Amino acid sequence: MLMSKGEETAAPVAGLAHRVPDLGALELLLAVARLGSLGRAARELGITQPAASSRIRSMERQLGVALVDRSPRGSRLTDAGALVTDWARRIVEAAEAFDAGAQALRGRRDSRLRVAASMTIAEYLLPGWLIALRAQRPDTAVSLLAGNSAAVAGRLLADEADLGFVEGLAVPAGLDEAVVAHDRLIVVTAPGHPWARRRAPLSAGELASTPLILREEGSGTRQVLQAALGGLARPLLELSSTTAVKASAVSGAGPAVLSELAVGEELSARRLVSVPVEGVRLDRALRAVWRTGHRPTGPGRDLLGLTRG
Amino acid sequence: MLMSKGEETAAPVAGLAHRVPDLGALELLLAVARLGSLGRAARELGITQPAASSRIRSMERQLGVALVDRSPRGSRLTDAGALVTDWARRIVEAAEAFDAGAQALRGRRDSRLRVAASMTIAEYLLPGWLIALRAQRPDTAVSLLAGNSAAVAGRLLADEADLGFVEGLAVPAGLDEAVVAHDRLIVVTAPGHPWARRRAPLSAGELASTPLILREEGSGTRQVLQAALGGLARPLLELSSTTAVKASAVSGAGPAVLSELAVGEELSARRLVSVPVEGVRLDRALRAVWRTGHRPTGPGRDLLGLTRG
DNA sequence: TGAGGACATAAGCTGTGCTTATGAGCAAGG
DNA sequence: CCTTGCTCATAAGCACAGCTTATGTCCTCA
């Protein structure tokens, strides 16, 4: 099955929201797991004990499984409850990342730390960093702007941002930089593709002569690939978002080239497999950048510290 | 800050649910992004167009950012909307994994494919596999039981499960097996720990003589580590869940040893960093197992196919 | 045996999100 | 030029989910 440009994930089974408890209920479950008592969990979330009791009960009805063992001296998770709690935790963590990003986005105008970042970093890394930053400096207001490398540089130079993150090859003029992480482009295919069974690495020549699913011309990912192959990348499909590229690759349309940051989940669930490549430099540094001579202080410095450890 | 046994993640900022839109709204946003129209998205989710309109609007109010550009011939995401949609997608994907797991759990009694799996696999891999299986065979009812290797073997031999997944070193007697993936134990520390800056790999001796944060005796993870070190692992803390081990390591209590499946997120957000190790075999095969001579057919065979590609 | 913690139950209120019905803007075709 | 059809927005009414307060029951410990 081949997907047209713009389409994304496969058939959404409508009604997910009716089969999965809402965020409040999941948070409550985590609190119960952690505190060992419905009442204490309720107090922590600022609701009353009967509300918590009823909420857990309706969640159990919804899932058709007992989640907690109630006893007169507290509540503990059942085996099924422990499993469900772990799945719930992943939803809540994703929600925390959403919240961290959204808070940054909201603050735009009236904030103290203004961050500009390239798409890949803003999507996959920044939310996690912002959660960590908030743990360290809870009352910092962060604003976030996402764009390509040139836009990030422009913001910094116009003093409309305090700290930037870019994934390009070259650092724009007028900026100082520090490498904060490394990313690598990898070749992935659906598990059924012939390349999935290869043991011998692909050569640069093979890669350049095979049509690939790629991001559009001008994207950072595409630039790095073309630089590595000497400008010879041949597109099988050109899609405008990382997600669309992933979805096409998963559906078996062909091999794709993507940042490893973007496909962690797909690789562990084996919806995609990585194909070894030889003789091509697909590594790229992820850099923090700032206006020359204006190394960030305060919260910006802290954020920088968090990214480098 | 050192955490006592049983405690888990850090202070939950109460009220996440009030700052993050609910699952229905996020699904709607994804549908709008994919279909390019509020009305079409509404129809797909089985609600009316005004309901969708109002829901998106209230989500924009909640986040304080415009998400979609409405025009008389459709709606497209704004830049901020594209970013928010990507964060939303991760929540929805986590919810799909939850749902896949929960459906399996629910079906216990009256199902056609009965799966038994070890904790790590049930938590981190099975939900993804089950999503893929449902795409392929939508009306298969799956039941799931999680336990240790011995429990999995017991279920299979008693004909109470059709297919099992284990992560132990040895395959229990009476079972046939196929390797479906590989997992690796890795040593991780908080970024501030001295080991985080090491370039030279740790030796087996160093690892064995340093107190580590570990799962409790008897867990699969602990067994593999002790086998690799000749039974010499020294616990600094012994915690009863993978999550508690992660939380302690993140908070800087010391180095921990964990499955790489469990720490993908923490590594990319650099809340944890991986420390190279030399001369110790920490790889372990993840195997599908079934009763000798009863190689799974039908949905079980399909699931097996999905895990191996 | 009585005090205090745990969870459950009941009754009442409020707010959110749905529905139907309608209006307004823009594009393309007879 | 005016109709048809698509878009989204607004308004009014209804229903249910989830909260609160008030109470009941069970167990444990002093």
Image (spheres, coloured by chain):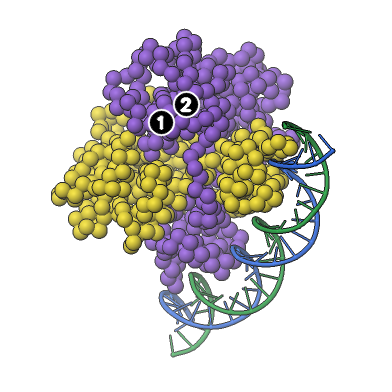
Chain colours: A yellow, B purple, C blue, D green
**Disc on res. B252:** 1
Neighbours of disc 2 within 10 Å: few (<14), some (14-19), many (20+):
some
Q: Nearer the viewer, residue A272 or B51?
A: B51
Determine the residue positioned at 28% across, 44% down.
A301
**Is residue A109 shown above or below A95?**
below
Q: Residue B269 is drawn in which quadrant?
A: top left
Instruction: Report the residue marked by disc 2.
Output: B259
Identity of the amino acid at label 2?
Ser
Instruction: Decide: is A257 above or below B298.
Output: below
x then y, percent, for residue A116 = 29, 52
Q: Is residue B62 left or right of residue A225?
A: right
Mark drawn on residue A81 = none
Q: Amino acid at mark 1?
A: Gly
Q: Position of residue A241 (x, y in %)?
A: 38, 50
User: What residue do we see at 54% from left, 67% from top?
Assistant: B54
The quarter in which the N terminus of chain B is drawn is: top left
Label 2 SS: strand
Q: Residue furthest top?
A: B230
Which quadrant of the structure image shows residue A208? top left
